[in-house]
Amino acid sequence: MKHLTVGIIHNEPIPQGEPNWESSADVLAQVEAIEAALAELGQPRVRIPFTRDLSRFVSQVQAARIDIAFNLCESVDEDPLLIGHPAAVLELLGIPFTGSSAMALLLSTDKLTVKRLLSASGIRTPPFFLYEGAEVLRPAGLHFPVILKPRFQDASIGIEQESVVEKSIDLLPRLEDLYGRYGAILVEEFVAGREFNVSLFGYPQPRVMPLAEIDFSEFPADLHRI
């Protein structure tokens, strides 16, 4: 593997203090950790940010003669709807990369689509409805407390302690606030309990990796485990 040049593809950092800058800083920490590990192995490597300037990105990739890549992009110019585009460009260039395909990334960033796919596969998910800035039409079978999640955001971006709503009187003000920041909001019945990360490796025959449970043991008692 000594002759391979490894590309580290990442989104541009968000300035400190702006919304979601902590998540952006975490990506850069991963970039530095991978870079350090490759340096220790004596592996040729180059980090390249991915933006809407595709011609520049492709030129940088070709100039560096990248053979394989770590895809660490969680958005493009802070737009989560473009999360699959870095993977799509790498696919078009024929460069193998870590992580999911462009299609998987695009589908999994849409929480509504994910819930529908899970339900179609016979996997139960909590009752929900989608708020798109109009009237709140809460299904009869949905009970409080509920948790509010931006439909189009990666992972837990936009989900805070205030996202858990205990009473119906508090629902609309919270929805209007989140809708103004993130657009469509998934309103889901809140399910308390343990939380696991489950990773799959390989395609088309995936292997289930060891389960990782999120440790909430040091959370203050008055905080929701989210």
Image (spheres, helix red, strand yellow):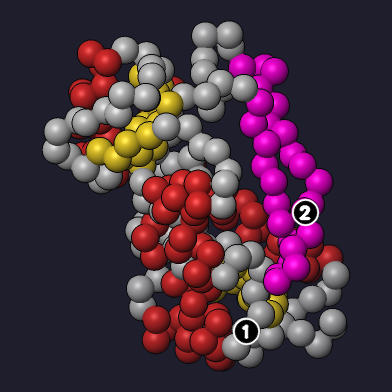
From what the image shows, is residue 3 above or below residue 134? below
Tell me the quadrant of the picture where the N terminus can be found.
bottom right
Q: Which residues are magenta?
A: 194-219
- The image position of residue 221, as x and y in percent, is 58, 8
Residue at the image point whose x is 56% and y is 21% from the top: 192
Amino acid type of the residue tagged 2 in the rendering: Val
Does 207 appear in magenta?
yes
Picture coordinates of residue 45, whole percent (x, y): 69, 76
Circle 2 Cα neighbour tier, 10 Å, few/some/many (<14 / 14–19 / ≥20): few
Give the distance between the C-alpha atoms of the residues marked 1 and 2, in whole angstroms.
25 Å
**Image check: 158 left or right of 114?**
left
Which residue is at 66% across, 26% downward? Answer: 194
Q: Residue at x 25, y 45 (%)?
A: 183
| Above or below: residue 88 compared with residue 79 | below
Q: Is residue 164 left or right of residue 30?
A: left
**Most foreground residue, 197 or 168:** 168
Q: Which residue is disc 1 drawn over?
A: 95
Left or right for 56, reference 172? right
Q: Secondary structure at mark 2?
A: strand
Looking at the rendered structure, the kind of residue marked 1 is Ile
Q: Are marks 1 and 2 in contact (CB under 8 Å)?
A: no
Residue 77 vs 115, above or below: the answer is: below
Residue 123 versus residue 184: which sits nearer the camera?
123
Q: Is residue 140 visible?
A: yes
Q: Which mark is residue 208?
A: 2
Q: Is residue 43 left or right of residue 53?
A: right
At a point 74% along the width and 79% down the height, the residue shown is 44
- Which numbered tag is attached to residue 217? none
The overriding secondary structure of the stretch rendered in magenta is loop
